[in-house]
Image (cartoon, grey):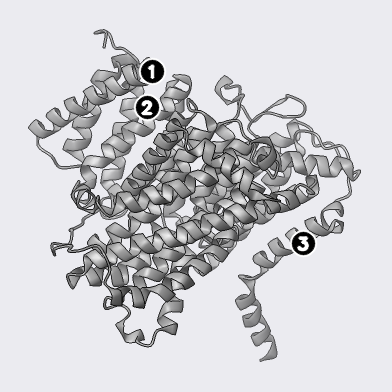
Amino acid sequence: MDVLPYLLHGFEVALRPDNLLYCFLGVLGGTLVGVLPGLGPQSAIVLLLPGIVYLDPVSAIIMLAGVYYGSMYGGSTTSILVNIPGEAASVVTCIDGHQMALQGRAGPALGIAAFGSFIAGTFGIALLTVAGAPIAEFALRFGPPEYFSLMCLALIVLIHLTGTSLRRGLISACAGLFLGTIGMDLVTGQPRFTLSFTVLMDGVGLIPMIMGLYGVTEVLLNIERGIQRTVVQHKIGSLLPSRQDWRESAAPIARGTLLGSVLGMLPGAGVVLASFLSYAVERKLSRHPERFGKGAIAGVAGPESANNAAAQCGFIPLLTLGIPANVATTLLLAALVLLGIQPSPMLVQSHPDLFWGTIASMYVGNVMLLVLNLPLIGIWVQVLRVPYALLFPVILLFCMLGVYMINRNVIEIWIMLGFGVIGYIMKKTAYEFAPLVLAMVIAPIFENAFRQSLILSLGSLSTFVTRPISATLLACAALLLLVPLVPQLRTVLGRLKE
Amino acid sequence: MVPGGVAFAVVWSAIGLAVCAGATTYGLGSLGQPQPGLFPFVVGAGIVLLATSEAIACWRAHAPSTRLRLGEHGSAVIVALAILCLYALAFERLGFAVCTLLLFVALFRALAGRGWRFSVAAGLLATVVFYVAFEYGLKVNLPRGPWGF
């Protein structure tokens, strides 16, 4: 498939003034939430969900995608200057980035993070451009059993990524699948589990649920922790890295980019793993591993490149297969559903504007981020001084008005608060709610694929394992389920031998 | 003492059982002709099985890390939730403007530790900004109280 004409069409869409504006707002907002500890890309996407239904779907996704990859840029600022990661993927940047800042080298640390992010992000988008359409074309061969197996795999990889316990992750996913069945049955129109509430006839609202779980729960957890932070007082200095800095960073940027691209494409591997692995690789390969933890620029360049490449490549499974690579892309999937677009391999053909427009907007957004980030560092430092105590009432009000806007019904606020409490309890008892959200989003497609597969195979469950693609996907899922059991099996075998 | 992990797993089991019971009322059908209840029944059964095994595992391990305990500022969470519930209760009765002003004052005073003067001033400012943004910017009809705003 010759991608150039499609990409050019994508640029036509992305360079429309309205889309340029939404892209700018997205990357600016993303950087802002990346900078602010306690607010991540998830919270920002969640806060924007009620508003996007009024936008053109292409503009909405361009903006939300910008928020996501923009936050990867912003996250490094907080890690370097405050030693608190703005978002999870920047945790490792704290180690050497903040040490550099304490040594008066905050400028080069911020500069190399921005340049590395730009290089890696652009490479990731190029990969998405080249690989996206062929993967989607291949996935067009999927029938209901393949879809069912693919979604099983997507759920299990997400559980692997987010959950501390596989069993709890599976419980959470099953709960999400149940929530997704509430409302009218898609085939017969029969109401299920609505408890005679009219508001539940269309199912549990995705926006109140997501805003409750990600908005309210996060605020409650942050209030409980009582966030304290101090901004580094040293002068930031020149943001342009020296020749020596570039020499030390070139190889880590290249390795981080490759590592992040590969891990980003795998559903579930995600940006956090990419940055951690990159740090480990750089430390292992360094001639001076003793410098790591004391301000090694390679410890900033590698992970920052890796997380940006992974963030961009995370769009490959999302846009081509309709399965998210991490929590933030799960929310983007939810956004697509809210906009009335069913994410699937058909997306490339049915919504070329959206597919190619989003890809092209990422090139534009990456340039915007580079141009924005370096001159705006001073402003971000000021933003970091805004206490969380002043931010959280605004976040809570945004959440409440956001859900109220949907149907102008106060019940939506109660549903959101209910999910806020559920999410808080789940977090306190070590249950992750990301699998719940993904399961609820995919539940209608999942159930449909399950029922269609059974009807087509005349009730034979073997249909899932006799078709090669479906069997391969299920085998991968089974393998992932069995991996955590390996240590336990070893212990049992060891005892048996004794 | 029963660890929170066990209690929570038991709650999940009960939810799973309720889902199974509810699903049977919609008809399960057969594998060849599945009815609306089949999928939720399978999901409910999955929750019961997983939650039961989780309860057993927690019971054996006494899982101290999963006990439901409030953190250092735990009481602040309860206060925040109480304020939010009151806001939801009063939202359509007292109207957006009054409720939002009270919400900000309460949150700033009770949770952010700010003085009355700051809380009222910041609350007024935030209320006006949000009112203008939503009522005029986004054209959302916000609820009005007995005073017409």
Q: Is residue A335 visible?
A: yes
- Label 3: which secondary element: helix
Proximity of marks 1 and 2: CB atoms separated by less than 8 Å: yes
Circle 3 crowding by C-alpha within 10 Å: few under 14, some 14–19, many from 20: some
- Label 2: which secondary element: helix
Q: Is residue A152 left or right of residue A269?
A: right
Chain where mark 1 sits: B
Q: Is residue A420 visible?
A: no
Q: Is residue A41 left or right of residue A200?
A: left
Check disc 2 and give the amino acid type.
Leu
- The residue identified by callout 1 is B140
Q: Is residue A118 above or below residue A457?
A: below
Q: Residue at x 61, y 22 (%)?
A: A196
- The residue identified by callout 2 is A401
- Label 1: which secondary element: loop
Check disc 3 and give the amino acid type.
Thr
Chain where mark 2 sits: A
Disc marking residue B71: none
Q: Residue at x 28, y 21 (%)?
A: B131
Check disc 1 and give the amino acid type.
Val
Circle 2 crowding by C-alpha within 10 Å: few under 14, some 14–19, many from 20: many
Please tell me whether mark 1 or mark 2 is closer to you in this view.
1
User: x, y percentage for residue A242?
Assistant: 26, 72
Proximity of marks 3 and 1: CB atoms separated by less than 8 Å: no
- The residue identified by callout 3 is A472
Q: Is residue B123 left or right of residue A197?
A: left
Please tell me whether mark 2 or mark 3 is closer to you in this view.
3
